[in-house]
Image (tube, grey):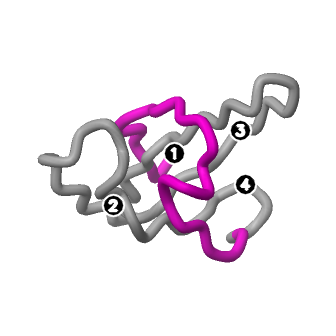
Amino acid sequence: MKNYEIIKIYKVIKINELIKIDEVIETHKFIRIYEFSKLNNKEENFKYDIGYKIINQDLEIISICFIKMLKI
């Protein structure tokens, strides 16, 4: 039984200019994301700071998947 729920998926370019990424968590490519203000939807209030990244090196496109961790 999974204990998370996918909230939103974004595709951004030049991720270093858009958000700040901290350390890798566990082995599921989870990362902590602290700054969302420069993403497409500035008006949205993100309550979740867990996500994972997928990097396509050829196109320099990174997909960010915001995940809501569910309480057990």
Q: Secondary structure at mark 4?
A: loop
Q: Is residue 8 above or below residue 27?
A: above
Residue beneath the point at 71% across and 38% down: 54
Residue linked to disc 2: 48
- The amino acid type of the residue labelled 4 equals Lys
Residue linked to disc 1: 2
The stretch of residues the image draws in magenta is 1-24
Mark 3 vs 4: CB contact within 8 A: yes
Residue beneath the point at 74% across and 69% down: 26
Residue linked to disc 3: 54
Image x and y of residue 10, in percent: 46, 33
Closer to the camera in the image, 49 or 71:
49
Work out how far the residue at label 1 is from the one at label 2, CA to CA, in angstroms. 17 Å
- The amino acid type of the residue labelled 2 equals Tyr
Kindly report which numbered mark, 1 or 2, lies closer to the viewer in this rendering.
Answer: 2
Mark 4 vs 2: CB contact within 8 A: no
Closer to the camera in the image, 43 or 31:
43
Q: Secondary structure at mark 2?
A: loop
